[in-house]
Image (cartoon, rainbow, N blue to C red):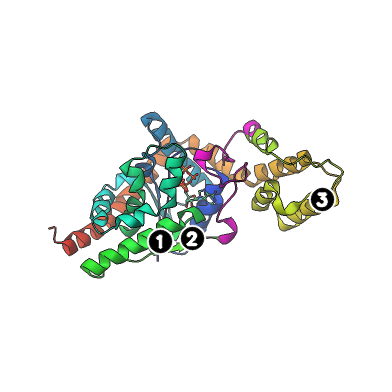
Amino acid sequence: MRILSGIQPSGRLHVGNYFGMMDPAIRLQDEGEAFYFIADYHSLTTVHSPEELRENVRNVAIDFLACGLDPSKATFFRQSDVPEVTELSWLLSTVTPMGLLERCHSYKDKTARGHEATHGLFAYPVLMAADILIYDSNIVPVGEDQKQHLEVTRDIALKFNNRYGEVLAIPEPRIRQEYAKVPGLDGKKMSKSYGNTLELFGSEKATRKKIMSILTDSTPVEEAKDPSDSIIIDLYRLVASNAEVEAMENDYKNGGVGYGDFKKRLFSAYWDYFEPMRKRREELLADPGYVDEITREGASRARESAAATIKRVREACGIY
Ligand code: AQP
């Protein structure tokens, strides 16, 4: 079984990325042949500074390894180190109906938020289909926001196979429902570009400040509060034990505890949860050559697999 997933170097990774994609991907590396990549071609649609892109790529590599990606089990590489993927993207675009892309929420959402309406942003799902199909992927662990793009990938693969024969494997998304859409500090989907994230490896001071600034209603300390509609509890649930969550829910219902106290508990649970990963990250930061070596080796393995698919696809289309 081939498992594939990618993450954009469009900013610092956050707990939404972690619970939606990184943690499931790390768990799956024991169950099949895992291919995980840093989607730098994709992030060019929103990151326009070369220095920032290089820095982001480096941080994503270090952060993913720190979180538990094991290069002896998973192939880890940069998308752009396998340029065959852009060739496949073109070949796929010749079978992709415009209507399929016009229906995609992500393009509308990003242009509505002020991102430039470029062809790259519009055609993003085709490159994503190529990312997945070029490695004959079976399972793709993603957050809920990528579900539609996975459906587009499947439609494109079926279109291609209808035209040229059974050339491409049809992938399945793997979405962990309980973490499908991690909320940001403002209650909207946590997203690098919304400025509402809880970073995985922010400094202690900045993280505490972010958590303490979560907006709450003005219910006084002594009064009961509603635990069913609380960002603090939603985030706490990600990093605390069931008993701790239950205790916080009871304190909400019983009154007598203020939001400031709940936020302190959230900070402390969050900080403890990522402590081992922070330590591992420090070690990786001290050994930059190691990280480069991992992604270089990963790229060479990924490229072998991509070359075999491209050969098959070219032959199917009549390009020799
Ligand atoms: N809030 C989230 N909850 C659950 N999963 C999430 N993912 C992202 N945000 C959440 C999942 O993380 C993986 C990598 O995402 P990405 O960085 O490649 O792009 P994205 O989904 O667009 O993430 P962002 O933070 O929202 O980035 P920007 O702001 O740059 O667009 C994906 O599997 C995604 O589902």
Dot placed on the residue nearer the N-terminal end, 3 or 2: 2
- Of 146 and 118, nearer the camera is 118
Write down the region rendered in magenta. 177-206
Dot placed on the residue nearer the N-terminal end, 1 or 2: 2
Quadrant, the N terminus: bottom left
Position above or below: 34 against 260: below
Q: Quick one: SS at disc 1?
A: helix
37 relative position to 119: left or right? right
Q: Quick one: SS at disc 3?
A: helix
Which amino acid is tagged 1?
Glu
Which amino acid is tagged 2?
Leu
- Of 310 and 120, nearer the camera is 120
Which amino acid is tagged 3?
Asp
The residue under label 2 is 28
Q: Position of residue 239 (x, y in %)?
A: 66, 50
The residue under label 1 is 151
41 relative position to 162: left or right? right
Q: Position of residue 10 (x, y in %)?
A: 44, 39
Crowding around mark 1 (Cα neighbors within 10 Å: few <14, some 14 to 19, many 20+) is: some
Majority secondary structure in the magenta region = loop
233 relative position to 38: left or right? right
Quadrant, the C terminus: bottom left
The residue under label 3 is 251
